[in-house]
Image (spheres, grey):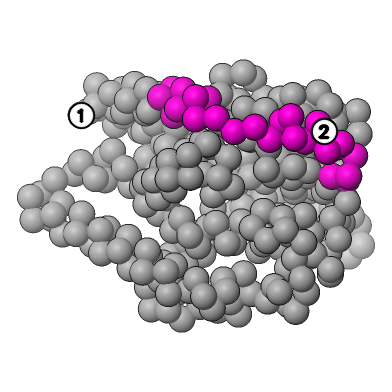
Amino acid sequence: MDGNGSASYAGIGGIGSNVWPLTGAEMISRSKLKELRARSNGPGLVNLAVHISALAVTGFLVWLASGNLWLQIPAMVLYGTIIVLTFAPLHECSHGTAFRSRWLNYLVGIAIATATLRPFLYFKYRHAAHHTYTQHDDLDPDIVPFPTSLREYFRLVLGASFWPKLLGTLWRGATGRYNEEEKSFLPDSVRGRVSLEIRLDVLLYITIAAASVYYGSMIALTYWLIPRFLGEPVLRAIRMAEHTGAEESPDLLANTRTTLANPIFRKLYWNMPFHAEHHLASSVPFHALGQLHDHVQPHLKHVSRGYIQVHREILAEVLRLQREKRQAR
């Protein structure tokens, strides 16, 4: 049972619930799904190696630009973008689809989550609720309300609500004082483990901060926290493109958007731009989402040519809503 007294059909990463029966996935035949669900360690290890290499190269650019803020800040933005894109392998590990080996999914997931200030187990259960109640106005914990003004739009992109929410998660998790929304997706049986992980994370962060002050070191700020902060707007813009402006309905063919990003970005973002496909069949590994796209593309209601196009459409609608408000006065 979920926190609202309704039975979830498939638990973690499942399809819908009695109160929000998601549709659309039935269009994928069982034989096709079985074919695409095959998991392997190889593609995940290759993608992980590519991502680590990109981090090393962009981190080296930050080092080369040391002493020149005009060069170092852009380098940090680039490096920070690669850092925040590790959200993709974290996401895949939470589904258990990044690798075939369960321990590898857990190990990589924990490592990325800790480095990006996201508790892994907490995210796993929160994300499961997002899949169960995709675009439900009250029950989807990750729903992004459509901005009705330019101010709201830029607040969403800049993460004005994201950072307080993230810090609140760490505080509540460390103290064990979860709010009602969190209790709805965190079963009693896992809250102790979730709190333990968060407490260990917070202890690690405090230790790094103390060591940085003691040794007068800027390494953690320069190569971790500042780039992590500077890169977040890129991830906010990407996450907005996944559902914002799509239907707030249980129809998976209409409530999620696929974005046809370039191959380099798809590689660094582990095929997550095929987002409608992922919601239709979250058990399909990232490396097979392109094949699933070929299979379902004619039925998808939101397929965009790129992230810039998505945000142009969102901004056009925001400006239209603002004009209507002014005319109504």
Q: Which residue is mark 1?
A: 67
Q: Inspect the image, locate mark 2, and give the three-letter code of the amino acid beneath it.
A: Ser
Is residue 39 covered in magenta? Answer: yes
In the rendering, at what x and y percent does residue 214 appear? 8, 56
Give the left or right position of residue 19, taking residue 177 as reference.
right
Crowding around mark 1 (Cα neighbors within 10 Å: few <14, some 14 to 19, many 20+) is few
In terms of secondary structure, what is the magenta stretch mainly? helix
Mark 2 lies on a secondary structure that is helix
- Segment tinted magenta in the rendering: 24-50
Residue 148 visible, this angle: no
Q: Residue at x 37, y 40 (%)?
A: 227
Q: Residue at x 62, y 69 (%)?
A: 185
Mark 1 or mark 2, which has the lower sequence index? 2
Q: In the rendering, which numbered label is found on residue 31?
A: 2
Q: Residue at x 20, y 41 (%)?
A: 219
**Which image quarter is the N terminus in?**
bottom right
